[in-house]
Image (cartoon, rainbow, N blue to C red):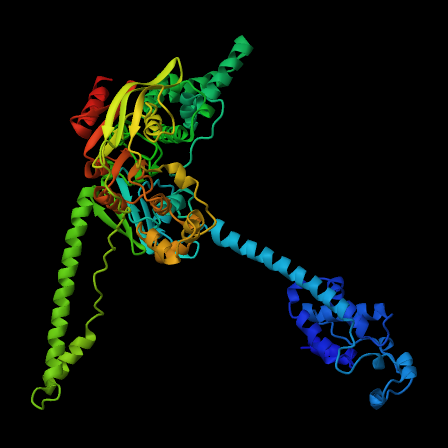
Amino acid sequence: MTTVEEILTQNVPDLDGAVFDYICGVLESTDDFNTTEDVYDAVGSVLLESSQDPTDEEGIRDLCALLLGVLRGDGNYEQFEESSKKLLDAPIYLGDRFKGDNAALKETNFWMMQPISKSFVDKKRLEKADAKLKLKQDKRALQEKSVSETRGVTLETATTSQATNKQANRIESAGGLLYDIKIENFDLSYGSRVLLAGASLSLTYGRRYGVVGRNGIGKSTLLRSMASRQLHLPAHLSILHVEQEVVGDDTVAVESVLECDEELSALLKREKELVALLAAEGSSTTAGENTELAQVYARLHDIEADQAPAKASRILAGLGFNPEMQKRKTREFSGGWRMRLALAKALFARPDLLLLDEPTNMLDIRAVLWLEDYLQTWPSTILVVSHDHNFLNAVATDTLYMHNQRIDYYRGNYETFLAVKADKLKNQQREYEAQMQYRQHLQAYVDRWRYNAKRAPQAQSKLKILEKLPELKPVVTEPDVVLKFPDTEKLAPPILQLSEVSFSYTPDTPIFKKISLYADMESRIALVGENGTGKSTFLKLLTDEISPLEGYRQAHRNLHFSVFTQHHVDQLVMDITPLQLIQSKFPGETEEQYRHQLGSFGVSGELAMRPVVSLSGGQKSRVAFALMAMTRPNYLILDEPTNHLDLETVEALAKALKKFKGGVILVSHDEHLINLACNEVWLCKNYNVYRLEGGLQQYKSEVENEFRSS
């Protein structure tokens, strides 16, 4: 294959060596040249200066076209036309160059105008061409880097592959309706990371499956792959995935729920059209129109359409929408309430497969208790991912455990799963130890007698037994999750006190009246109450973000709060790594100190070097914990800290809060965390905040009594 070097040698044989090397180096980057003009811009001026005829621009452009053909590999390797070659008018005697100043020779001979030790090219023009090319290459490199970063960070997507389920395909092709789900031998990846390999998923219609596993293991990705049908599911199955909030518009809340039943909406629309048509036509109506209207009414009766508004209203009420809120337009609700609307629509529609990803995140304890009770009688299949220990115990009939790129099945709720898994690991460890002891016994016999003449045959026999035994693998257990908040010094009381505090944003709408409470360094307080009763406002009063209108707030002069909210997680910079993020927020420390801080919250090793956008929700929460702890607080305020955390991390958080030497105020719907970490419960209700002597159980009893009375 003809090369750039050969073209230059053939067509410009007298080219200076330094210029030759320069041009070859410039033309190495073939991607930079798409037209003859690109090549001419890069090296044309240099070639023109080096030419025997500096005015032969057309000849140089022909040479650039020839070079472009070589770079593009299109076979255009013909040499220059003979007309582009120039004969010397007279012989050149290079020896005369060293005989002092020969003015006449210098005037008539181009070659003698250049010192022997220097290139004959105009260096300024060479530098200008070099700078121009470098600018172009740098621009291209920057674009490629930007594309690479975009592909590597923001555009990672899930990919799947699965074996064909021939039995399901036969039933489906024969017109049968199969509601059980069986996905065999499938792989699931996210970007370059393999989440599941050769896994199988079997769901029996009418069962409720809780999906558990560590943060980042792929639980949410599995649900998205099923909802988008990347994993093949029977076409007739209706699937709803509650993940995104409802888009706000002028539709009132209860109507938006009713609209999700497509059959009901279509029947009501057709009924309206037929009634209008019959009214307009009068006596000229056809029998067909009357028959169709009768069929519409019959179907509406079958699906109990007259009860649909009441059903939608009951669901909304259970999720915390009072009668006034049910009549409000959806655009008037915040993101959290729109998520509740999305959940209400899914519950009303009753799909064949309901996929719930952390459904309790936006709910208060009252709504969680209602949802637990409502799902007990769910007729179809549910697949739910949740961090809430008690919710999974109440809802799940089966548990799917995702770990080590596979899915294990356990019959029973989460508590049963924990017990069975622990027994299974113990049995596996006992079996491993017994096998290891057996192998060691065989090996000891071989080592002792293999060179003994009498017992060598027996030793050889045992050696063969050893060689035939399968490879023995130790029991793999997941490492314990450990979270650690920084130590702090004890403060002498009084620490924090509210006395006769009242507050309102407007004079006619009071939020709190006459609150009197105190907290110390040993306090582990759970703040509970329905959404909308003022819990967030109360936290702002405690942290002095807002001031009471009446009464006073007293706090220790060295009291230092650190607040965690879901907003802090949502505001993380997504296109950098956790290590870069903590360095930018708190400069001045060593990399080792930053890594130690992240490691205290389970963000270590490769995880600390991955872009934040690629982390799971729970992993992002851990990063937010690490940032919060960098301020060395002595009082923690945590607003729904368990959102997106896995169950093991919730347990670790409870232990970390108990060991923390400062005070804690916790807003959470997670009963398990409250029971593990808190020693008192404050209820936000009826313009007041007060201590419940009976703790969380007293609050649950009050809520259950309200359910029964309603």
Residue 547 screen position, x and y as percent: 37, 24
Q: Which residue is most to the left?
A: 454
Closer to the camera in the image, 535 or 23: 535
**Picture quadrant where residue 501 is located:** top left
Residue 402, position as x, y percentages in the image = 29, 50
Compared across the picture, whether 369 is left or right of 331 comes to left
Residue 204: which quarter of the image? top left
Q: Quadrant of the N terminus?
A: bottom right
432 up-or-down from 370: above or below: below
For image coordinates 47% across by 30% down, the residue present is 247
Q: Quadrant of the C terminus?
A: top left
Residue 569 in sight from this viewpoint: yes
> Residue 289: x, y in percent?
49, 18
Q: Image point 22% across, 17% down: which residue?
A: 709
Q: Is residue 83 left or right of residue 120?
A: right
Residue 138 shown left or right of residue 592 in the figure: right
Q: Is residue 407 above or below residue 27?
A: above
Residue 633 horizontal/vertical position (percent): 31, 41
Is residue 195 shown to the viewer in this render?
A: no
Tell me if residue 466 comes above or below residue 377 in the rendering: below
Q: Residue at x 38, y 44 (%)?
A: 226
- Of residue 499 and residue 55, the one placed in the foreground of this image is 499
